[in-house]
């Protein structure tokens, strides 16, 4: 390599084990084995479905870069020992570059996630159901809000049984469970039993005793003649952020050790899962919150000398979940619905304060279908 090479000339590193290249002015390093494995030529990737046609074992372990140069705006790489030549689009490479600063400290979330409190969430759009159903642009806005906030509302639907299923079908597929494809949440309150049936429900995520837990929940209002009974949502990622700022060692305990959850409330059903209350990915990304007082089982995976600290952190998290400063409250009218990312956003119901009836209907769905539809809409846009 001549010493007077221009700045954007690719430079081989470690005898061709890797290269250093400037992509749109950004220096990035790539390994030979990574480049060869990610070649986009039709012998490596099916041009129709994009699926890889070779296995890693088809690539020589001793693969090196013999030569790399720009040609017609593409980075042209010749590999040893097989002599294969592959061209890479610089923007494709830049979008997938891994020569980046390490992720921040544990508990981080990606650029597509915004943690919220009421000040932010109350500015989030409430979309019209019919518009979302018929207008791809409105549907895109709705799905983007769900990805960003883990929560979104729709209003103005026809209040009829099956509404949550129809809403799920706007982006994906219903997740059927032992509760059925759809389940009813009815509160029938008359003056004589008001004291017993109007209780609020502590904020929770649904069904942490499943593995995987449902990624999304939709709750639709079909009838509502009571006072009170507001719906409440809390951003579990915001709760985690507060806990981490206040008590980093407590946050660490809730991420490091598994809780247990169980449900055995029906004949033939023994659902159990062992998962952390705050779950991190292998790279420290905060990926899930599970919080459900009613289905928490005996925690038996925390060492004796950590249990007191674990409970202190769990208690502080429960206090934050109850903090009115973090709760978004709204009243559902018949034909309104909301969707939550059930591995992030907790939901609750405030106490019902009058006689009457309230009929909600809900269903679960998985997040992969939603994110797939969203990505497809974005690609079309
Ligand atoms: Fe629930």
Image (spheres, grey):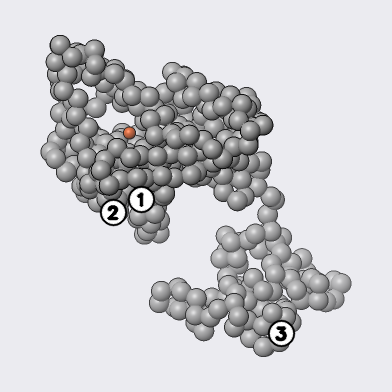
Q: Which residue is mark 1?
A: 366
Q: Which residue is mark 2?
A: 173
Position of residue 89 relative to residue 274, above or below, is below
Q: Residue at coordinates 35% horizontally, 27% vertically from top-left?
A: 348
Label 2 CB-ligand 1 distance < 8 A:
no
Is residue 249 found left or right of 55 in the rendered image? Answer: right
Q: Which residue is mark 3?
A: 80
The image position of residue 376, as x and y in percent, is 37, 58
Query: In front: 209, or 351?
Result: 209
The image position of residue 53, as x and y in percent, is 49, 80
The image position of residue 19, as x and y in percent, is 73, 70
The image position of residue 330, as x and y in percent, is 31, 24
Whole-angstrom CA distance, mark 1 to mark 3, is 44 Å
Quarter of the image holding residue 300? top right
Position of residue 277 relative to residue 376, above or below, is above
Position of residue 343 relative to residue 359, above or below, is below
């Amino acid at each position: 390599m001549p010493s007077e090479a221009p700045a954007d000339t690719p430079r081989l590193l470690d005898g061709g084990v890797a290269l250093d290249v400037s992509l749109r002015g950004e220096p990035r390093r790539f390994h030979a084995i990574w480049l060869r494995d990610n070649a986009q030529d039709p012998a490596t990737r099916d041009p129709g479905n994009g699926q890889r046609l070779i296995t890693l074992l088809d690539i020589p372990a001793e693969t090196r870069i013999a030569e790399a140069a720009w040609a017609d705006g593409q980075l042209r790489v010749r590999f040893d020992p097989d002599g294969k030549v592959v061209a890479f689009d610089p923007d494709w490479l830049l979008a997938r570059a891994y020569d980046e600063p390490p992720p921040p400290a544990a508990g981080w979330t990606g650029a597509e996630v915004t943690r919220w409190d009421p000040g932010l969430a109350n500015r989030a759009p409430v979309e019209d159901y019919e518009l979302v159903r018929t207008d791809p642009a409105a549907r895109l806005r709705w799905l983007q809000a769900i990805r960003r906030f883990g929560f979104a509302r729709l209003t103005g639907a026809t209040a009829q049984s099956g509404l949550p299923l129809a809403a799920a079908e706007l982006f994906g597929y219903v997740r059927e469970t032992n509760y059925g494809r759809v389940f009813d949440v009815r509160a029938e309150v008359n003056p004589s039993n008001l004291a017993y049936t109007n209780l609020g429900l502590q904020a929770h995520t649904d069904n942490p005793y499943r593995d995987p837990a449902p990624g999304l929940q939709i709750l639709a209002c079909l009838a509502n003649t009571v006072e009170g009974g507001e719906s409440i949502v809390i951003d579990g990622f915001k709760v985690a952020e507060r806990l981490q700022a206040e008590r980093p060692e407590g946050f660490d305990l809730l991420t490091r050790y598994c809780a247990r959850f169980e449900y055995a409330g029906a004949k033939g059903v023994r659902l159990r899962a062992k998962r952390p209350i705050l779950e991190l990915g292998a790279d420290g990304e905060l990926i899930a919150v599970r919080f459900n007082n009613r289905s928490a089982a005996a925690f038996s995976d925390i060492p004796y000398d950590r249990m007191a600290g674990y409970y202190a952190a769990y208690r502080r998290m429960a206090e934050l979940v109850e903090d009115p400063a973090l709760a978004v409250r709204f009243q559902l009218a018949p034909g309104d619905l909301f969707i939550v990312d059930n591995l992030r956003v907790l939901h609750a119901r405030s106490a019902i304060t009058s006689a009457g009836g309230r009929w909600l209907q809900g269903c679960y769905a998985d997040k992969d279908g939603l994110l797939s539809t969203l990505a497809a809409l974005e690609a079309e846009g």
